[in-house]
Image (cartoon, coloured by chain):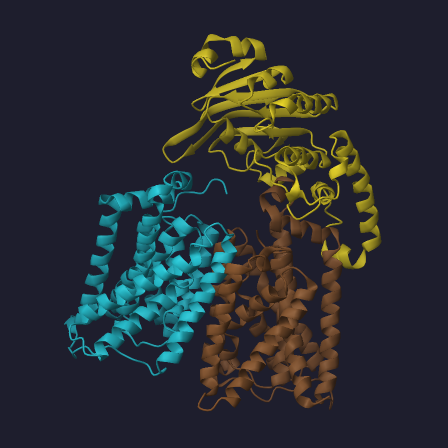
Amino acid sequence: MMLDVSDVTVSYGPFLAVDRASLQVGAGETVGLAGTNGAGKSTLFAAIAGQIMADTGRMVFDDHAITNHPAHQRARLGLCRTFQVPREFGRLSVLENLLVAAPGDRMETMWSAWFARGAMRRKTQQLTVQADGILAMLGMSGLRDLPAAGLSGGQKKLLELARVLMHRPRLILLDEPFAGVNPVRIGEVMEIFRRLKDSGIALLIVEHHLQALKALSSRLYVMDQGRVIAQGDPAEVLASRIVQDAYMGGVL
Amino acid sequence: MNSVFFANLVLNGLIEGMVIALPALALTLVMGISKFPNVAVGDTMTVGAYVAFGLQAAGVSWFALATLGAIAACMVLSLATYQWVFRKLSKAPMVVNLLASVGLAFMMRSALLLWVDSQPKTYAFPLVRAWNFHGVRLLPTDLWIVLTAGAALLVVFALFRYTNVGRCLRAIADNPELARASAIRSKRLTWFLWCLFGALSALGGVLLAAKSVLLPEFGWEFVIPAFAAVILGGIGSPVGAVAGAVLLGVAQEVSVAFVGPSYKITVAFLVMIVVLVIRPAGLLGLLEKAR
Amino acid sequence: MSAYLIAICIIGLIYALLAIGLNIEYGETGLINFGHVAYFAIGAYASALLSLRGVPVSLSILLAGLLAAVAAIPIGFAALRLKDDYFAIVTLGFAEAVRITIQQEEWLTHGVQGIAAIPGLAAGASGNSVFLAILLLVVLCAMGSVYLIQHSAFGRVLRAIRDNEVAVVALGKRTAGFKVKVLMFGSFFGGVAGAFYSHFISFISPEQFVALVTFYVWMSIILGGVGTMRGSLVGSLVLVLLLEGSRFIGDFLPGVSDLQVAHLRLGVIGFILVMFSLYRPQGLFGKGGRA
C-alpha cells in the first residue's frame, strides 16, 4: 500500500467538510476520487497533500507516517501534487520552471552560487537533459524557453504536470487535471496519463469528469457530504444506486 | 509599585485602548475589503486632530462641533484617496496599494508640516481636577473620551448589524466572490467604507490628541499599535480589533511601569510578533487552515 | 576630484549598497521588507561603538555587517510565515522598535545626543578619496556576489518563491530557509552600508534612522527598476541627485529654511511613490518583485 489514509476528519468551525474518510492507493495504481460539489473531495485532497492539516485520522505514505508532516516534507518523500489552477513561475522560462522543481538541496545554496559553480553547472546540465526528456514526452519541447506566464491555460496545466515529474514522484495527487480542458484535447491528455501509468507512478485523481475517471482508474471512490459513500470498480460504482442518488440523476 | 499604581495604569490603558480601537477598526475594515494595510491611517488621524485644533482655534466654541468638522474633513480626505488612487489600484497587486498608501501618508504629513508649525499643541479644555477614587485617578476628559469612543464603536457595530450597507460589507469581507457578483451596489459600498475609514481615523486622532499633545508625527506612531491590535484580536474580525486594541492598550500602559513611557511602540511590536508566532489567528480570528 | 563630488559619490554608493540589499530581498525573492533602515542603524551604531572602543575600523565594519545579518534571523523566522502584507508591517514595526531602543538605551548609544567623533577609515587615510575607493571596492564585491546569486540555482529558487511560493513548497522545498538567508544577506549589506555611513559622517543619532530612509531606498529601486543590478545603481544616483538637488534649491530660494525643504522633500517622495504606483506599477514588479 503506497498511500493509506484512514478516518480523516476536517472541519471548519462547526462545518464538517470531511467526515471520517478513508482511502488507499497501491503502488503504481491509478485511483479516482469523485463527488458532488461540496462533497469534500477537494478538502480531503488538500489534507492528503499537506496544504491543510486534518483534525483526526492517520496517513501513511510509503511506510512513513505523514499525518503531521508539512507539505514540503510530503513532497520530498515522493508524494507530489499538481494544482487545479496552475501555479506556474510566471517570469521563469518553462525550462527554468522544471529546473526549480528538481530536488536540488546541495546545489541550491549561496555557497554553491559563489564557490561551487562548476559542480552547480554540471548538475544543471544533467537536470536540463532530464527536463528536455519530460518536455518531449509531453509534446512541449517548443515551449522550452518561453516565459511561463505566456503559456495558454492548457499548456500551463501540462507544465504543472511536467514540473511534478521532474521531482520523480512515487505518487502524484492530481487536482482536477481535466478541468477547463478543451473537449477536443481530452484525448491527448488521457493519452499522457496512460503513459504516466505505464511508467509505474501511482496516481490519485480528483475529478468531476466521470468518463475520464472511469477510463483511467482501476478503482474509484465517491464522496458525498464529507463521507466516502462508495468505492470499488469504477463502472460498478458509478452505476450503483447510492451514487446515482447522490448525483441526483446527473449524467454519468 | 502597589495596586493603586497598577490600577491607574490599567485604567489608563483601557481608555487609550478604547481609542486605538477606532483606527484599528478602520484598518481591519479596509483590509477586509481592499486587502491591503492602509498605512495612511496614522497620518489621517493627525490630519483629523489638527483640523479639530484649527477649528477650535478659529473660534468654534463647542468642541464636539470641532470634532465633527474633523470627521467630515477626514471623510472627504479618505474618500479622495480612494477615488483618485485606490480605486485605480483595485486590481493591482497588494504591494502597489501598500506603497501608494505609504506615499499618501508622506504627502499628508508633508502638507501638515509645511502648514502648521511643529510646536506641540493641545486642545483648549477647561482645567478640571481629576476625580480620585482611593488613589485611582480619572480625568473628566478621559471619561468623555472613553464614552465617545465607546459610542462611536457601538454606532459602527449597529451599522454593520442593522443596515443593508453594513450587512453587505460584512458579506463582502467574508466572501470576495460574492462581492464581485454584487457589483451594482459595490460603488456605494466602497464609498461608505472609505468614509467610515476617514471618520474613525479622525475621531481616533482627535481623542488621542485630547489625551496628550499634538505633533505632526503623532499619528504615525499609532500605526504599529493599531496593526498590533488588529493582529492580536484576529485578522478579519472587527470585534477582535476592538478587543485587541483594549488589551494592547492595557499591555502598553502596564509596560510603562517596567520600561518607561517611550517604549510603547516597541511593546506593540513585541505583542504583534508574539501573537504571530504563537497564535497567528489572533484571539478571535478564524483559524486559517489553508493559505 | 573636488571634495564635494567625492562626498556625493560616497553617499550615493552607500545608498547603492542599501538598494542592492533591498533588491535581493524584494526584486529577487518578493519579500516586502519595510524595515531595511533597522539594519542600516544597527550597522552604523555597531561599527561606531566598536571602533570607539579600539577595534580597527575595517574589522568593525565587517562585524557590524555580521551583527546586522544576525539581527535579521529572529525577524526572519517570526515573520516569514506571514502573508506579505503582514510581513511588511512587522518589518516596519521592527525598524521603529530598533530606533526607539537606540534612542532610549542611552548608556550604550548616548540616546538622542548621538555618538560623535567616530573615526574614519584606516591610518591617516581620512582623505575621502581613499574612503571612496574602498567603498567602491565593497560595492563592486556586493554587485559581484549578487550577480553570482542571480545566475545560480539558488537564485532560480528565489525567483520561483517570488512568483509562486506555494508551488515551491509543494515541490518539496523549505522556503522559509531560503527567505531567512536572503534577509540575512540583504541585512548584511544594510549593516555594512550603515557602518560606512557612520565612519563617513562621524556623527550619528537616532533621527538619522527613521522609517523614511527605508522608503528612500524603496523609491530608488522603483525608479531604477526593481530586480535589476542596474536598477540599484541608477536608482541610488537619482535618489542622491534628488536629495542634494532639493538642498540646493532650498539654498537658492530666499525665505525657505532647511527644515521646510526637508518637509517638502517628504511630500515629493510621497508623491513619487503614489505616481509610480498609479502610472508605472511595472516599476514595482515588471522585471522583479511581487505580481
Is C76 or B222 nearer to us in this picture? Answer: B222
Residue for point 70% across, 54% down: C155
Kindly indicate the quadrant of the structure image that contains residue C214.
Answer: bottom right
Colour chain B appears in: cyan
Colour chain C appears in: brown
Residue C250 percent coordinates (x, y): 51, 86
Left or right relative to C200: residue A20:
left
Q: Height in image: B201 above or below A149?
A: below
Is B29 or C177 nearer to us in this picture? Answer: B29
Q: Quadrant of the N terminus of chain A?
A: top right
Residue for point 70% across, 87% down: C128
Residue A9 percent coordinates (x, y): 46, 29
So how many labels did they put on this image? 0
Visible residue check, residue B217: yes
Kindly indicate the quadrant of the structure image that contains residue A182.
Answer: top right
Residue C145 percent coordinates (x, y): 74, 63
Is A82 or C90 nearer to us in this picture? Answer: A82
Chain letter for the part of the structure drawn in yellow = A
Q: Height in image: C213 above or below B87?
A: below
Residue A239 percent coordinates (x, y): 52, 8
Q: Height in image: C3 above or below C177?
A: below
Visible residue check, residue B10: no
Is C128 or A155 nearer to us in this picture? Answer: A155
